[in-house]
Image: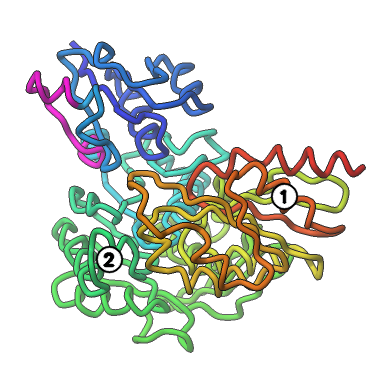
Amino acid sequence: MADRYHFIGIGGAGMSVIAELLAAGGAVVSGSDRSDSPVLERLRSLGIDARCGHDAHAVSADATVVVSTAIRESNPEYRVARERGQRIIHRSEALKLASQGMRFVAVAGTHGKTTTSGMLTVALAEAGYDPSAAVGSVIGRYGSGAHVGASDIFIAEADESDGSFLNYAPVIELVTNVEPDHMDRYGSPEEFEAVFLEFADRLVEGGLLVCCAEDAGAARLAEAASQRHRVLTYGRPERCLIPVDVQIHDVHVGADGMKARVSYADISVRISLPLFGEHNVLNAVGAWTVGCELGVLPEVMAQSLSAFTGTARRFELRGQVGSRRLFDDYAHHPTEVAAALAQARMVAQGGPVTVVFQPHLFSRTLSFADRFARALSTADHVVLTDIYAAREDPVEGVDSSIISRHIQGAQWVRDMHEATRVAAHLTGENGVLLLMGAGDITSCACDALRQWESLQ
């Protein structure tokens, strides 16, 4: 008899991917989410019973119930599973089950893990290695963040937000950066960095840790972990805080994408991708390093990376009307916001840049309000909408105004659809409008496009 799983919150990016992988492996999978979505429609097309709304009667008594940190004990499906004494596991444990017997490669970091794990997945497939993957965004090649491949390699985006990446036992770990976030959980930068060292200690015997040495936190991780693990570092030597193994030179980032030369020992290759931003140079070299460790020839891995064109909501072009272009980005940390706006400025080629920003979590907004304001100020026009609460309850006195009041000319428009229309009106000819945030702001793309169409 096939294993049975029920996912509470199955429409989430991480949850849906794992549900898809387990179903592809022969399990009977069901689940629910609070509202319908294209994700649920896709799951239903794959034979998964994905329902809109939470109902205790939807939970089969013989199912293992899968939850994320966002699911509260008051959820009726969670409550009935506990009352019955059913097995309840975190989504990271379900992912571990889906990857049993495979070479597990975990991609972690405060920023860039989705793009980097997507790059690695596509490049390995292009090189003929066809890995399985669990990535928290849609990879265009597969139309999903989930893929069941023919090889024994499993690529997973590993989440540090709730410490769940400590459930894995990887053969390779790639850490893009370790910049403090999720202070509601970790309390201090030191505690945040400490959990990454715990993560490194989850490597199997003889495993490899790959770290970006341009990031201070990742460089400290590499130094600490090198006492008991094999470690490779990568980056531009002049920007690295420690000696670097895989060196990046001759970086060029333009409106047509990025190029760089990579050298390691006696190997020298050139990498070229149709992506924007210096951070994507680093992401690509991290992926190249892991691919070579997995057995791909260095030149083949470099060429294969060029097949990657991005993942959904990572500076994704959503439409164009006349000379105005609309991009959508998942950025929700000040460093990510600054990088996305730098990309927008490059793409605009002198045209105006407008941003609609939906802050994510009350705790993050309070912790980083000043840094958000500085990052957003690089846009010509800034519109903020209400905070996306996700798993949190509202915090008295914390709203988007604690960011907007520090930005000259910024507007705070509570309704995200109206905020998008206001921003579209502010976006002039040859302009770029960027929808930004980890919440549901992505659903507002049509508001901007319709606004522009009305001007034609």
Judge whether residue 92 is colored magenta. Answer: yes
Q: Where residue 429 appears, x then y in whole percent?
A: 87, 58
**Marks 2/1: CA distance?**
38 Å
Assess disc 1: are there few (<14), some (14-19) or many (≥20) residues with their C-alpha within 10 Å of its C-alpha: many
Foreground disc of the pair 2, 1 = 1
Disc nearer the start of the sequence (2/1): 2
Read off the magenta span.
79-95
Q: Residue furthest right?
A: 456
Residue shown at the point (47%, 85%) measured from the top left: 239
Label 1 element class: strand
Looking at the picture, which amino acid does disc 1 mark? Answer: Leu
Q: Nearer the viewer, residue 179 or 266?
A: 179
Residue position for label 2: 209
Looking at the picture, which amino acid does disc 2 mark? Answer: Leu
Answer above or below: position of 408 versus 139: below
Residue shown at the point (18%, 69%) measured from the top left: 229
Residue position for label 1: 326
Judge whether residue 136 is colored magenta. Answer: no
Tell me where residue 220 sits by quadrant.
bottom left
Residue shown at the point (38%, 20%) measured from the top left: 53
Label 2 element class: strand
